[in-house]
Amino acid sequence: MRHILATVLTLACVISPFTVFAQKGGFPEIKQLQGPQGGKLGFIIHGGAGVIRRGSLTPEKEKEYRDKLTEVVLAGYKALQDGKTSVEAVEIAIRMMEDSTLFNAGKGAVFTHDGKNELDASIMDGKTMAAGAVAGVRHVKNPISLARAVMERSPHVMLIGDGAEAFAKEQKIELVDEKYFFTQDRWDSLQKVLKEEKDKSENVKKPGVADAMPASREPQNRFGTVGAVALDKFGNIAAGTSTGGMTNKRTGRVGDTPIIGAGTYADGFAGISATGWGEYFIRYTVARDIASAIEYRAQTPQNAADQVLKRVADAGGDGGVIVMDKLGNMAVSFNSEGMYRAYIDSTGKPVVEIYK
């Protein structure tokens, strides 16, 4: 028996250099080494994936996006440099994007079919596996802060609608009038989709006219979400995501953003934030699947993300993810035409990208 145990221990150490064994009660106990050596920091964000082609943005608008992404990624990274936790850095970055009209989250949220703004967000602490999420809120200025409050100040993981807003009031989370979320561009987008829907409804009644794709399935209406993943000096990973959902969604529709394991996930091995066609990301538990591939198959973040998103694409869904593992290795993967993203490279400089 001792010979067998010695062989098992030897093989295990060869297979995984990041795993050590401690003897406990006569049986080996697996202990994972937490985080990278030397306090390496990592920070990456996204501002949504979708129909973002070269030339589709004016030079002025593209500069506006690049400037904001640079500002946000630098702010999150500085928070880490100042000794803040990964959870704090994620919240700081996402709040900044929620406060911008450039992104489909917070102030820039899209409208539902009924002309309302319903916001979702989630955050997860990889160190403790604690998570918090909110869905369908209409008056919360920064849903990511409410999600963090749910995680840290309640026994729950998710609160929705009126209950979430009642909790926000108790916790002194800032509430705003619904008018705060109105932006003309988002309103015009809804009117365009409603007109397409009406025209389609009239056309299908005419003989010989082919049925068109429902407006809610049009690619340009599905995307928009913001997210961040951080690795702090303690070797802990956190991930968060926030969104206004999809233009013309039914009132009460909830996508993947507040679903832990679908749109957001973090553990001791990786952190993931997703953006895309939420129904597919829920069905394929995209974020958790990527983390599992990194943990159990020892895949790189890039390989894990690419393989999981291929399954989504093969099923008819599209979108993207940002991923970071416990060593600070990062990946971006998307099967849409573009994705707003930024990260801090190995030299400490920001890198901002939009197109493929």
Image: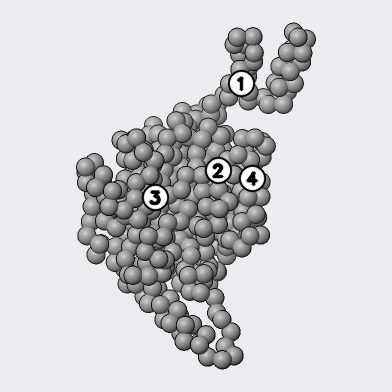
**Which one is in front, 74 or 93?**
93
Q: Quadrant of residue 288?
A: top right
Which quarter of the rendering shows the N terminus? Answer: top right
Whether residue 167 is visible, yes or no, is yes
What separation in Å lies between label 4 and label 2 (alpha carbons)?
11 Å
| Circle 2: residue type | Arg
What separation in Å lies between label 1 and label 4 (alpha carbons)?
24 Å
Whether residue 101 is visible, yes or no, is no
Q: Upstream in the sequence, badge 3 or badge 2? A: 3
Q: Are marks 3 and 1 in contact (CB under 8 Å)?
A: no
Please state if 83 lies on the left or on the right of 330 as rendered.
left
Please state if 206 lies on the left or on the right of 145 as rendered.
right
How packed is label 2: few (under 14 Cα within 10 Å), some, or many (20 or more)?
many
Choose mark 3 or mark 4, whichever is in front. 3
Q: Position of residue 68 (x, y in %)?
A: 40, 56
- Residue at 45% across / 60% down in the picture? 224
Judging by the rendered image, the residue that carries numbered circle 3 is 121
**Which one is in front, 57 or 337?**
337
What separation in Å lies between label 3 and label 1 (alpha carbons)?
34 Å
Judging by the rendered image, the residue that carries numbered circle 1 is 30
Judging by the rendered image, the residue that carries numbered circle 4 is 304
Q: Position of residue 129 (x, y in %)?
A: 46, 34
Q: Residue furthest bottom?
A: 207
What separation in Å lies between label 3 and label 2 (alpha carbons)?
17 Å
| Circle 3: residue type | Ala
Q: How many marks?
A: 4
Judging by the rendered image, the residue that carries numbered circle 2 is 288
In the displayed structure, 257 sits above or below 80; it is: below
In the displayed structure, 201 sits above or below 11; it is: below
| Circle 4: residue type | Ala
Q: Upstream in the sequence, badge 1 or badge 4? A: 1
In the displayed structure, 137 sits above or below 26; it is: below
